[in-house]
Image (cartoon, rainbow, N blue to C red):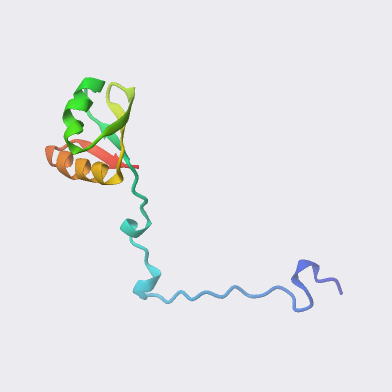
Amino acid sequence: MNRGNYGSGGPRPFKSNFTPGNKSNSHSLEKRTKRGPTIYIHASNLTESVLQSAFKTFGNIVNIKIASGTTAFLTYEKVESAEVAITEVSKNFLAIYNY
């Protein structure tokens, strides 16, 4: 009898090590999130000069891309600079995210 690609034993049942309530099964967002040097900025009337003024104190800016008047991507030389910028600027209620 032909059993296809399963060999002589037939298909193998799926086995999982998942145990409900086991904390080792959960992966926090923080562990899975990759941090990078680029931050997403959403605010009104964004210009390159406004972004330079607001973000230059946190590190060396290597690129600014304004997608629209309200959306921009700002890239630092170092990931740490982006993280500090997010922490400090978010205190001022700007919606920014690390990519």
Indicate left or right for 12 with 9 as reference: left
The answer to whether one can see residue 47 in this image is no
- Above or below, 44 against 22 in this view is above
Indicate left or right for 61 with 20 as reference: left
The answer to whether one can see residue 87 in this image is yes
* Residue 83 at x, y percent in the picture: 24, 45
The residue sitting at 18% across, 45% down in the picture is 87
* Residue 47 at x, y percent in the picture: 24, 20
- Above or below, 1 against 85 in this view is below
* Residue 31 at x, y percent in the picture: 34, 59
* Residue 98 at x, y percent in the picture: 30, 43
The residue positioned farthest toward the bottom in the image shown: 9
Quarter of the rendering containing residue 20: bottom left
- Above or below, 26 against 44 in this view is below
The residue sitting at 20% across, 32% down in the picture is 55
Quarter holding the C terminus? top left
